[in-house]
Image (cartoon, rainbow, N blue to C red):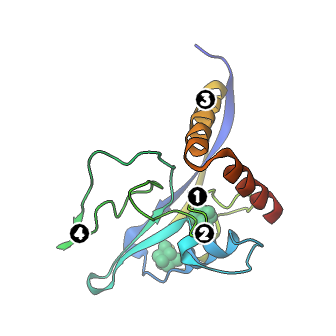
Amino acid sequence: MSDNKTKKIIKTIRVDVDKCNGCRACEVICSAFHASPKYSSNNPARSRIRIIRDPLTDIYVPVYAGEYTVAECAGRDKYIINGKEYDECAFCRASCPSRDEFKEPDSGLPLKCDMCEGEDEPLCVKWCEADALIYEEREEDIDEAVEQEALEVGLDSLVSKYGLENLMDTVARMSERD
Ligand code: SF4
Ligand code: SF4
């Protein structure tokens, strides 16, 4: 058993779907915060949160960008809510080869929610006047070796799909932004 345990703050955003009114303020602020330079533009296609909407039945579901995945699933999910059938994979958080969601529109690189690194509180939470997004923090023990291994596996997948040079360019652009 590894004793390389360390404390980590786990950040979560609870989504109260019933309170979301589909205003999309969260998409606007997320894409503006991640623009380069910061706040120079806003384009919901660059947002790390997307609202799946069906205004006719008053259904709005915020979905956060999660992990990048190199291969698509062998099966697909379809949801029916209040009689409306949603597109395949509509509520999936992955940046995946089978669709365009959660990909940077210019480069095609995957987008992932980073909890607005550097901010006291995620900006989508701050901007949600309906209180549909609730920010929470808790402390957990984590195994450093497992974390490092997960990071390496993720980086390997990105390098094999986009090439090292493209990734390095993106990292350089991200550091200029901050
Ligand atoms: S800001 Fe809040 S209410 Fe508006 S779309 Fe986003 S989650 Fe829904
Ligand atoms: S926490 Fe920040 S990065 Fe994540 S979706 Fe909200 S605004 Fe975007």
Amino acid under disc 4: Ile
Q: Is residue 132 visible?
A: no
- Give how far across and how far down residue 131 sits, in percent: 51, 73
The residue mark sitting in front, 4 or 2, is 2
> What mark, if any, has residue 170 been given in the picture?
none
Q: How much space separates mark 4 and mark 1, taking CA atoms?
A: 31 Å
Q: Tell me the residue that label 2 is attached to.
A: 106
- Relative to 38, residue 15 above or below: above
- Determine if the C-beta at disc 2 is less than 8 A from ligand 2: no
The C terminus is located in which quarter?
A: bottom right
Sequence-first disc among 4 and 2: 4
The circle drawn on residue 109 is: 1
Return the disc, 3 or 2, that comes first in the chain's sequence. Answer: 2
Q: Residue at x 27, y 53 (%)?
A: 76
Q: Report x, y in % for residue 155.
A: 62, 40
Q: Is mark 3 within 8 Å of ligand 2?
A: no
Residue at 29% from the left image edge and 45% from the top image edge: 74
Which residue is disc 4 drawn over?
A: 81
Whether tag 4 and tag 1 are in contact, CB under 8 A, the answer is no
4 vs 1, front mark: 1
Residue drawn 69% across the image and 30% down it: 6
> In the rendered structure, are the residues bearing label 1 and label 3 in contact, judged by CB atoms less than 8 Å apart?
no
Of the two numbered discs 4 and 1 on the same chain, state the one appearing first in sequence.
4
Q: Is mark 1 within 8 Å of ligand 2?
A: no
Q: Are marks 3 and 2 in contact (CB under 8 Å)?
A: no
The amino acid pointed to by label 3 is Glu
Q: Earlier in the sequence, mark 4 or mark 3?
A: 4
Asked if the residue at label 4 sits under 8 Å from ligand 1, the reply is no
Residue under the image location 44 percent in, 73 percent down: 51
Residue position for label 3: 149
The total number of labels drawn is 4
